[in-house]
Structures are given as C-alpha cells and as structure tokens.
Image (cartoon, rainbow, N blue to C red):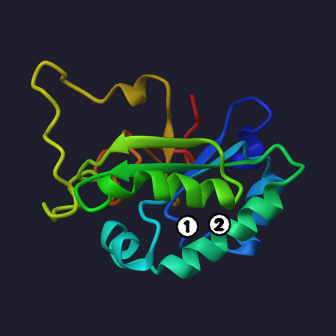
C-alpha cells in the first residue's frame, strides 16, 4: 500500500518499535515511506517499560538504532514522539538527549492520552480529558489512518478497528 501511494502522498508509519526489525525497516524504506514516528517514552528500562506497557527497552533501542542506519541517505526519516505523563515528566531532557545521541533529531513531546481507551493506568497517564468545547480530535482533518489489516480508521489509536471507515483492500481509496 505504501509503495502504491508514496508517489502521490506523504506517507508515515507510527509504531512502538517492537516489530521494527531490520527486515521491516528495509521494506518500509524500499516502499518509499517518508517517516516512521516511533513512540519512545523513557530513557531507561523501568520507566520505558511502564510507559510502553512492558515493551523491552533494550530491544526497542536496538531496533531504533538499526532503523536510523537503514534510513540514512534515503527519503525515510526516523522521528520520535514522547508522550509526557506522570511517570516520565521529570525525564524529558534525558529522553531527548538519548534520542539525539541515537540520531533522532525530530522529536515531538505531547501530553499522554488514553490511547483510544487502551491505556487505563492513572499512574502512567494523568492527562485530563479533552474539554467539552472541543468536540473532536483535529488530526483526522488532514490524516487518513490505515491499519495493518487495510482498514481506514478514524484514529491511529483505534487498535481494534472499532471505528472503521472502509477497507482499502476491497474499496477504492477515494
């Protein structure tokens, strides 16, 4: 799918880095992907594991290193998003420094949210809900999310495809 649309659209892939193996990173680069947004929410194993639901810090860091090397001298850009919450708010400078040392310079810091209802631990995510005056997330105005099954969903956090708009495997994209 990325290869099919990469000549006509900006393409990006958001992930937690666990499955970002050398083979996967190479395939994404060869398909013409523009950006990988990697969620990276800690600078050491304990905080990282807590923020990332138990994902192993060292494995993800190794995957990040490989992906940065694979992206070098290509159109693929590796970027990071850090969700700031109670568990890591005092560590943002250290997280940024770590990512910079690993070759990631484009880093976004955002308030942690409940990941479409999937993150329920108040010790990790203590961000207040969206104000009532804001009736929707504005991201959908400029972004189309296609999940791993080909489902167009309204939010990249809709991990279970509960709010699918269509299926790009059997329906035209438009």
Horizontal and vertical percent position of residue 48: 40, 70
**Residue at image location 58% in from the left, 61% down from the top:** 98
Image check: 163 left or right of 63?
Answer: left
Image quarter of residue 6: top right
Q: Quadrant of the C terminus?
A: top right
The structure residue drawn at horizontal position 46% and vertical position 81%, both measured from the top left corner, is: 56
- Identify the secondary structure beneath mark 2: helix
- Camera-side residue of 101 and 20: 101
Residue 55 locus on image (x, y percent): 42, 77
Rendered residue at 74%/60% (across/down): 68
Relative side of 161 to 97, left or right: left
Q: Residue 5, which numbered label? A: none
Whole-number angstrom distance, CA of label 2 to CA of label 1: 7 Å
The residue under label 1 is 17
Looking at the image, which residue is at 13% across and 60% down? 122
Mark 2 or 1: the one toward you: 2
Counting the numbered discs, the total is 2
Horizontal side of residue 97 vs 112, given as left or right: right
* 135 to 63, vertically: above or below: above
Res. 146 in view: yes
Residue 52: x and y, percent? 37, 68
Q: Is residue 88 above or below residue 112?
A: below
Q: Mark 2–mark 1 contact, CB under 8 Å?
A: yes
Q: Which residue is mark 2?
A: 64
Q: Position of residue 21 (x, y in %)?
A: 68, 74
Q: Within 10 angstroms of label 1, few (less than 14), some, or many (20 or more) residues?
A: many
Judge whether residue 164 can be spotted in this image: no
Depth check, front residue: 72 or 75: 72
Which residue is most to the left?
A: 132
Q: Nearer the N terminus, badge 2 or badge 1?
A: 1
């Amino acid at each position: 799918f990325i290869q099919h649309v990469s000549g006509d659209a900006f393409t990006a892939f958001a992930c937690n880095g666990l499955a970002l193996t050398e083979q996967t990173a190479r395939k994404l680069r060869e398909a013409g992907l523009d950006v990988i947004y990697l969620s990276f929410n800690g600078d050491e194993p304990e905080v990282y594991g807590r923020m990332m639901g138990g994902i192993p810090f060292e494995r993800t860091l190794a995957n990040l290193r490989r992906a940065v090397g694979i992206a070098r001298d290509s159109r693929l850009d590796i970027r990071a998003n850090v969700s700031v919450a109670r568990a890591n708010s005092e560590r943002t400078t250290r997280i940024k420094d770590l990512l910079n040392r690993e070759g990631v310079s484009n880093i976004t810091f955002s308030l942690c949210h409940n990941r479409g209802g999937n993150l329920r631990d108040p010790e990790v995510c203590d961000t207040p809900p969206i104000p009532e005056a804001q009736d929707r997330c504005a991201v959908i105005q400029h972004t189309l999310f296609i999940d791993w099954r080909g489902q167009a969903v309204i939010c990249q956090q809709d991990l279970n495809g509960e709010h699918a708009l269509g299926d790009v495997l059997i329906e035209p994209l438009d």
